[in-house]
Image: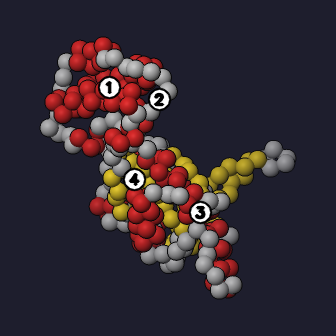
Amino acid sequence: MINEELQKKIKLLKHKKQIILQGSPGTGKTREAKEIAEEMAPNNYKLIQFHPAYSYEDFVRGIVATTTDDGQVSYKVQNKVLAEMAENANKEYKLAKDEDRKPTNFVLIIDEINRANLSSVLGELIYALEYRGEAVESMYELDGSREIVLPENLYIIGTMNTADRSVGHIDYAIRRRFAFVDVNTDESVIPKNAKSLFGEIKHLFNEYLSEEFELNDVMIGHSYFLADDLKQALKYEIKPILYEYLKDGVLTCEKDKINDLKTIQIKG
């Protein structure tokens, strides 16, 4: 049984068709995205991760090189993850209409969606996100057609790390086509043995957070404090990200403030 907050996100996704779960590291954005996908399309969802080199030809449609049986190299146009999923969803949508039933859903999860140049990666699909069922023309022709259609039963969930300012900016035209949902640190799930450590770290952020940043954008998430071995997590996961925050100007305290976290008594 999924909780009320997740139900709200599912309701929003069904209405908007594409949402972005945004929050600081370790708040469970990807986990939530997968839970939503499992609920909406248990057998028809896929997870991919964007990176700075990701392109339209990787995501929508592009030319690929293939080797023939006689060793010759040939080139052909091929649908990639979004166009391929759209094609399958369209077939299901039309079949369901013919059979007078609700179509099966398809969900695409794009982890770290803002790490790629979205305007470049999406191309003409920016229009198709909003106008479902209307064909847009790809720059590549496949099987005699340039058309790509995003149907009503195809949903997109993106995740975005709000602490990372080094990645791509999402422009207003694309923002308008997504609903943005905050996923914040959930203190209620932090176990008793980790509450003292969490309190000390939260104090660091309250006292030494740069004015350029919002607390919810950078406060490390609850998943860091759910580790079976909290001492190991502190040494190899929590401290390293706090040191990075120092270098990036997110935190303005002395390094010793982070070093001193080792003196905290961690039970268990």
| 214 w.r.t. 170: above or below | above
Q: 137 or 23, which lies in front?
A: 23
Q: Which residue is mark 4?
A: 21
> Dot 2: within a 10 Å radius of its alpha carbon, few (fewer than 14), some, or many (20 or more) residues?
some
Left or right of 49, for residue 238: left
Amino acid type for the residue under numbered disc 1: Leu
Three-letter code, disc 4: Leu
* Horizontal and vertical percent position of residue 123: 45, 62
Q: Earlier in the sequence, mark 2 or mark 4?
A: 4
Q: Amino acid at mark 3?
A: Ala
Query: Gap in Å between the C-alphas at discs 3 and 1?
Result: 38 Å
Q: CA distance from mark 1 to mark 2?
A: 13 Å
Asked whether residue 58 is in view, the answer is: no
Q: Quadrant of residue 104?
A: bottom right
Viewer-side label of 1, 4: 1
Q: Mark 2 = which residue?
A: 227
Q: Looking at the image, which residue is at 85% across and 48% down?
A: 69
Q: Assess disc 1: are there few (<14), some (14-19) or many (≥20) residues with their C-alpha within 10 Å of its C-alpha.
A: some
Residue toward you, 157 or 215: 215
Q: Residue at x 52, y 74 (%)?
A: 152
Looking at the rendered structure, the secondary structure element under dot 2 is loop
In three-dimensional space, the C-alpha distance between marks 3 and 4, rounded to whole angstroms, equals 18 Å
Density class for disc 3 (Cα within 10 Å; few <14, some 14-19, many ≥20) is many
Residue bearing the label numbered 1 = 197
* Sequence order check, earlier mark of 1 and 2: 1
Q: Are marks 3 and 1 in contact (CB under 8 Å)?
A: no
Residue 24, quarter of picture? top left
Helix, strand or loop at label 1? It is helix
* Element type where label 4 sits in the image: strand
Task: Estimate the spatial distance between the alpha carbons at disc 3 and disc 2, rounded to whole Å.
Answer: 30 Å
Q: CA distance from mark 2 to mark 4?
A: 23 Å
